[in-house]
Image (cartoon, helix red, strand yellow):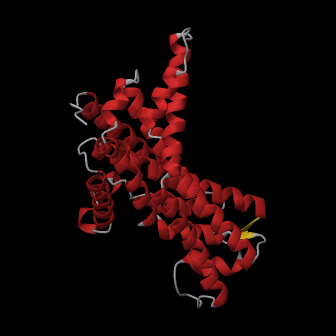
Amino acid sequence: MSVAESVTASAAAGGTAPPARTTWSGRLSGRLLWSELGLIGGRRRNQMGLLVLAAVPVLMAVAVRISAPRAGRGPDFLSSITSNGLFVPLAALGVEMGLFLPLAIAMLSGDAVAGEANLGTLRYLLTVPVGRTRLLAVKYASLVVGALWGVAVVTLSGAVVGIALLGTGPMPTLSGTELPFWSGVGRVVLVGLYIAAGLAALAAVGLFISTLTEQPLAATVALMIFTILSWIADAVPQISWLHPWLLVDQWQAFADLLRDPPFWDNVARGLWVDLGYAVVFWLLAWARFAGKDVTS
C-alpha cells in the first residue's frame, strides 16, 4: 500500500463523528509518518542498503582479527581496533560517512517527493486533507529517522562484532587516558548522534532537490554530486575561507568526542552548521513545494 492509499484509508476511518480538528490533525500526521516509515522500511532496496551498511564494520572487524594492522599504519581508529572492540563502530562510521551513509540518505531523499511524483501518487496524496507544509514536514521527519536508522545499524553491528571478535575493556581516549566500558559506550552513542545530525542536514538538501524534479534517480545523483563537491572543496586549502560554510567541514570533528574531556568547540560549530543547512534548505523546499504545480 502506498502512502497516499494508507492516509486516505486512515482519513476515511474517522467515521461519521470526527474528533476535534487539532486531535484529528495530529492523528493524521502520526499516521502519515508511520506510513512513510513503513514504506521506507519495506522497500527491498532500502533493506539491502542497510545490509551493506552493516556489512562494512563486520568486514573490518574480521580483517583486523585475522591480520592486525602494523604499528603506525592506517587511521588512528583502525590502529586502535585491536585494543578494544568499541573502536570497530567508530572506524566503520569514519569510513562510511564519506560515501555509503550519504548515498543512503541520497536514495531516501530522492524518493521523498520526486519518487511520489514519478509514481503518480503525489497529486493523489494531496487530495487528502493533508497540507503541503505538513506533508513536507513529515517527509523530512522520516528522512531524519532514516539517518538515525543508518547510523544505528552501523554502530550496533560494529559494536556487536567488535566485542565478539576483539573483546572489550577500558576504552583508550585520544588524550591518552582510559574510560570505563559503559562510559566508552556513551561516547560511541554521542559520536553516532553527531554523525546522524550531519546526515539529517544533508537530507534537507536532498529534500529540496527532490522538489525540483520528478525523477528520483536525478535527485539522488544530484545530492551525491553536492556531497562529493563539498568534500573536494573542503580539501582545497586555497579556498579555506569557504570551509566553515561547507556542510562536511566539521563532520570529522566527532573525534573530539573521544578526548578526555571532550573538546566541544568544533562539535558545536558543526552542529550550528548542520542546523543552518537543515533550516535553510527545508524552507527552500517548502517555498518550492508550496507553489509547485503538481501534475502527477
Q: Is residue 268 visible?
A: no
Q: Nearer the viewer, residue 34 or 69?
A: 34
Pinpoint residue 276: horizontal percent, then vertical percent: 38, 41
Quadrant of residue 167 in the image? bottom right
Residue 20 against residue 146 in the figure, above or below = above
Residue 274 against residue 279 in the figure, above or below = below
Pinpoint residue 59: horizontal percent, then vertical percent: 58, 78
Residue 179 against residue 295 in the figure, above or below = below
Residue in the picture at 52% in, 66% down? 53
Residue in the picture at 76% in, 72% down? 168
Count the marks: how many?
A: 0
Is residue 104 shown left or right of residue 163? left
Viewport quadrant of the C terminus: top left
Q: Nearer the viewer, residue 79 or 12?
A: 12
Q: Nearer the viewer, residue 253 or 196?
A: 196
Is residue 66 shown left or right of residue 225? right
Residue 53 against residue 32 in the figure, above or below = below
Pinpoint residue 58: horizontal percent, then vertical percent: 61, 74
Pinpoint residue 38: horizontal percent, then vertical percent: 53, 44
Is residue 64 shown left or right of residue 236? right
Residue in the picture at 21% in, 30% down? 293
Is residue 256 shown left or right of residue 216? right
Q: Is residue 189 visible?
A: yes
Q: Nearer the viewer, residue 246 or 263?
A: 246
